Image (tube, rainbow, N blue to C red):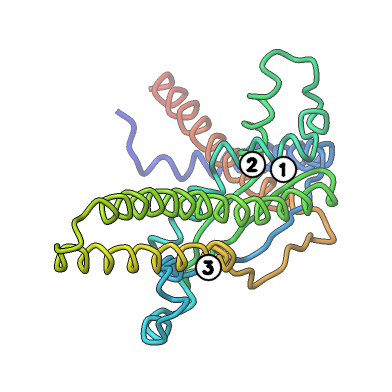
């Protein structure tokens, strides 16, 4: 059994070999890193708006307006994340910017699927401790990186608006049908049924008020996010991070070299003994 105290003399004895392989790994990594394609990072920062701003009552109730702040919470941020990562947004971006051709995937099997996977790999959307959402995109073409970042924000805004418009329109249609039904019932009531007629008239008035509120909300839909840092692209390539890669390679090479010389030296000592 090899004494652990023998490890240090072994490492000292083979120190120049360890140093050589460590430096060699760094040189090879640096050389290969320079051959890798450079990628530029585009980024933007947004914050979610308060989902309660979608309440139709905000249009005519001053007390409600005062209760709602502009910025959303973590639940609102999660919704923004979900929209940005949704297939709807990603497919629209891929089609509008011709990313299949840009990623040289045209004509390949499952080109559309591969394009979306590549796009997902090239983007990173994270939330910070301050509640902002950081959108980052990497691409070999800085102009394209910027265009994709802008498209993510634009499509998130548009999809959020479309969802609300669809919901409000459905609500208007349901209220209109309900109002028509009540008006038909009212027209069939006997004139002597004063209480019932009054109750139905009040319900019809309230229904029409709600319809007006929803119709006003449709043309005054607040955005689902606020851009606090406009999309911009770095002047220099962000990837590959050559110093980091070289340091990591040298650390790994040094560790492997030390393990190897310890095992080799230990076997040599055991053989001698």
Secondary element type, mark 3: helix
Find residue 94 and report its horizontal and vertical position in percent. 72, 36
Residue shown at the point (85%, 61%) measured from the top left: 235
Residue 26 disc label: 1
Q: Nearer the viewer, residue 93 or 134?
A: 93
Secondary element type, mark 1: helix
Gap between marks 2 and 1 measured at Cα: 6 Å
Q: Nearer the viewer, residue 149 or 34?
A: 149
Quarter of the image holding residue 272?
top left
| Horizontal side, residue 107 vs residue 255: left or right | right
Find residue 263 and report its horizontal and vertical position in percent. 45, 28
For the residues bearing labels 2 and 3, Cβ distance under 8 angstroms: no
| Horizontal side, residue 150 vs residue 236: left or right | left
Q: Name the outermost residue toward the top.
A: 109
The residue pinned by badge 3 equals: 216
| Horizontal side, residue 224 vs residue 44: left or right | left
Find residue 58 and report its horizontal and vertical position in percent. 44, 76
Residue shown at the point (33%, 68%) measured from the top left: 206
The residue pinned by badge 2 equals: 249
Depth check, mark 1 against mark 3: the one in front is 3
């Amino acid at each position: 059994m090899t004494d652990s105290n023998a490890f240090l003399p072994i490492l000292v004895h083979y120190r120049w070999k360890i140093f050589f392989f460590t430096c060699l790994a760094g040189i090879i990594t640096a050389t290969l890193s320079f051959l890798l394609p450079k990628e530029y990072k585009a980024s933007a920062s947004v914050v979610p708006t308060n989902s309660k701003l979608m309440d139709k009552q905000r249009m005519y109730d001053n007390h409600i307006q005062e209760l709602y702040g502009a910025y959303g919470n973590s639940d609102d941020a999660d919704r923004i994340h979900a929209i940005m990562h949704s297939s709807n947004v990603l497919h629209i971006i891929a089609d509008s910017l011709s990313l299949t051709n840009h990623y040289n995937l045209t004509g390949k099997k499952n080109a559309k699927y591969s394009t979306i996977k590549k796009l997902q790999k090239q983007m990173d959307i994270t939330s910070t401790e301050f509640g902002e959402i950081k959108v980052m995109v990497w691409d070999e073409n800085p102009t394209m990186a910027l265009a994709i970042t802008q498209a993510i924000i634009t499509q998130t805004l548009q999809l959020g608006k479309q969802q609300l418009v669809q919901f409000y329109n459905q609500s208007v249609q349901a209220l209109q049908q309900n109002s028509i039904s009540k008006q038909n019932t009212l027209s069939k009531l006997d004139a002597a049924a004063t209480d019932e007629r009054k109750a139905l008239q009040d319900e019809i008035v309230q229904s029409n008020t709600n319809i007006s509120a929803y119709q006003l909300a449709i043309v005054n839909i607040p955005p689902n996010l606020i851009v606090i840092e406009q999309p911009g692209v770095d002047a220099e390539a962000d990837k590959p991070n050559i110093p980091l890669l070289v340091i990591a390679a040298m650390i790994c090479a040094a560790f492997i070299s030390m393990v190897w010389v310890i095992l080799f030296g230990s076997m040599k000592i055991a053989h001698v003994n």
